[in-house]
Image: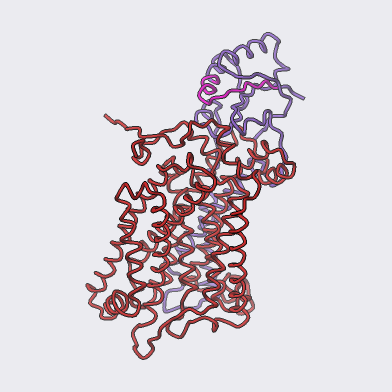
Amino acid sequence: MYNTRVRGILIKGDKSYSDVSRDVLRPLDAKTPIWWWVTAGLAIIAMAWGSWGFYNTISTGIGTWGLNNNVAWGWAIINFVWWIGIGHAGTAFSIFLLILRQKWRTSINRAAEAMTIFAVMAAGLFPLLHMGRIWDGFFIFPYWNTRGPLWDNFNSPLFWDVVAISTYFMASALFWYVGMIPDFATIREKTASKIKRKIYGAMSFGWVGNAKSWLRFETAALLLGGMAAPLVVSVHSIVSMDFSVSVVPGWHTTIFPPYFVIGAIFSGFGMVLTLMIVLRKIYSFKDYVTDGHLDAITRILTFISLIMGTAYLTELFTAWYSGSEYELFTFLKNRVTGEYTFAYWTMIICNGMIPQLFWFKKIRKNITIVFIISIFINIGMWFERYVIVVTSLSKDFLPATWATYEPTITEVAAFVGTIGLFILGVLAFFRWIPTIAISEVKSVLKETTTLKSFTDEN
Amino acid sequence: MKTNMLGIYDDENVMLHAIDKLQDGGVAVADVYSPFPIHGIWSRLKQTTRLPYATFAYGAVGAVLVFSLLYWMSVVSYPLKFGGKPLNTLSFIIIMFVMTINIGTLFTFLTYLFREKMFPGKKVELPDPRSTEDKFVVVIADIGSLSEQETIRIKKLLQETGASEIKESTVTLHEH
């Protein structure tokens, strides 16, 4: 006998359908709040500084960075991988949970997808910048040229990366937009402002919402989602191959693809948690993004953190078991101990240990602590990429070429600039786009869940 | 201009039950406008979509096309050895895999818009705009062609099945 225990409701506050539209659209109609202007101002200052970093790099060259012959990859690649990792949450969230029919995703997926779009935009800037001669960037495409024509090296992970990330960006953006069409139509029919009706009307593509259009909508969403799901796995696997197909000690390991994919989902979920706590606070969305939702995310993070910890231990074990003195040196003398101890242990503590505090219900229930831990995860994941990129390159096979790496102000500026870009994107999303998928929330309004997170005693 | 009758419901389950009653009574339900997808409707209105077949076709054609291009570029047009690897390599699979998804996604999206006749800036008029908010609108098409008795019978059926409002509309239905 199969018995499902119904645990709790997804959306609190006994909302009616029109309550949902009203609540979600309220911030769009309200006057732009002060905090918005202040944050946007800070983001623009960050972007201005970032533009200086970009200008400096492009006009003078990569020599403005702290790179050297040995450490040829620095902050640019670290930040690229970090942003791409964060960009994984949107797809992981909406698409995996869509395919797994997890209905609690509906309150969060729109924001997670928005985050994906802006994070991937920020990520994409770094490889472009790293080209040095950015005006020759089109060389990466296989186009008919006068040099043979000479085509790309289709066996290069760097080329795979270009294809994978642009595809990921396109697929995420289309999936995101298709999901928003019915909500734009709701604004079109509801708003009193003529200008808004025009703009959102144009963006709603003439959505009518009859039976057939919902059928095609659902089918299209499932198809786009189903196709993007393997991308979550492939994009970061390909990013990891940028490293693992080389012979550099610490990179040349088969654990890299799964290790990178799970790391990406970890950092993405961490950033979703950060963002959702902010969103529910400033817009009072506590009935939609309930404590149960946050609890469900923290439970997932606890599990992923365990996998991360296992991956770190596996790396150490493999370095020892391989019998390769170079591997052993990289891990034991250059990571666990040595010059980069701080970065390594920050990574271990932030990713492997701190999230384990989520085992305690008291900590899961305390949103302030949850928020702080989510920030630690973001920091930890940045250090993971720092450890991977810098430690391995700084001391490889030839001690004569050993070098250390310090970022220059230009590199820091470029990174801060992309943070500004990301924040400005998220702010624009908060201001002009329904941050919760209205039609999807309406469809689960009467639903209950079987998840333990949503029990009342929780 | 054809006149349609609208039965407006407040609850999707009441409305689904109403559709059954109407269809049992021999009334053809032309369309249903709702604020979110309702899964019981499509079987009742006998609606299907062939979108998945199109996606499969795009993916299949895409995979073949991408392989042909890679093969032609690497083996025929400019055979250049990289790192001693064969010209026609297994690692083409990675580009093929990603590009199959790329082509499948893009063309599925375009087909969706094309079949829905949707484009940026398209203007539409809904029989009742509240169907994007919280109402479920059941449409009985072209009541002008029906006898007066039949119209009264339909109205009564709508009332009995729990419609909160019944009205007539001259807005053209959205054909797909």
Decide whether residue B6 is among the magenta residues. yes
The outermost residue toward the top is: B149
Horizontal and vertical percent position of residue B139: 64, 24
- The residues colored magenta run B4-19
Decide whether residue A61 is among the magenta residues. no
Drawing shade for chain B:
purple
Horizontal and vertical percent position of residue A108: 48, 46
A9 above or below A269?
above
Residue shown at 75% from the left, 41% from the top: A194
Residue shown at 54% from the left, 84% from the top: A63
Can the viewer see residue B53?
Answer: no
Q: Is residue A380 left or right of residue A106?
A: left
Can the viewer see residue B5?
Answer: yes
Horizontal and vertical percent position of residue A56: 60, 79
Drawing shade for chain A:
red
**Camera-side residue of A309 and A141:** A309
Q: Quadrant of residue A268?
A: bottom left
Horizontal and vertical percent position of residue A99: 43, 44
B96 above or below A451?
below
Quarter of the image with the C terminus of chain A in it: top left
Quarter of the image with the N terminus of chain A in it: top left
